[in-house]
Amino acid sequence: MGDRWHVEVDRSLCIGSAQCLHHAPDAFRLDSARQSHPVAPDSDAAEHILEAAEGCPVEAILITLAEGGEAVFPPEE
């Protein structure tokens, strides 16, 4: 069985660019304030979700391992 991820969007950083929707339209949605939200905060690890996080111009998408909380993106320094 593969890794499970916990996905969060830092609303204080999100600028509503919708790049996450471009990379992973099934995994993110924008609310009426154009703030991104994960559709399912806990999900199976998936390349398109990682690409969405990497493509966010302000790195507002945070991915951690659901079990243990280790950072997936952005990577810890």
Image (cartoon, rainbow, N blue to C red):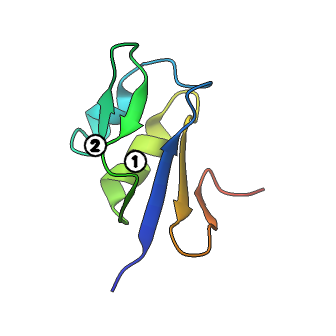
Q: Residues within 10 Å of mark 2 (few under 14, many from 20)?
A: many
Going 40% across and 29% down the picture, which residue do you hit? 36
Q: Position of residue 65 (x, y in %)?
A: 53, 68
Disc 1: which residue: 51
Q: Is label 1 in contact with label 2 (beta carbons under 8 Å)?
A: yes
Against 72, residue 13 (above or below) is above
In this view, the residue farthest toward the bottom is 1
Classify mark 1: helix, strand or loop.
helix
Going 37% across and 29% down the picture, which residue do you hit? 19
Classify mark 2: helix, strand or loop.
loop
Q: Position of residue 69 (x, y in %)?
A: 62, 67
Disc 2: which residue: 24
Which amino acid type is marked by label 1?
Answer: Glu
Which amino acid type is marked by label 2?
Answer: Ala
In which quadrant of the rendered image does the N terminus lie? bottom left
Against 69, residue 52 (above or below) is above
Going 34% across and 22% down the picture, which residue do you hit? 31
Against 51, residue 44 (above or below) is below
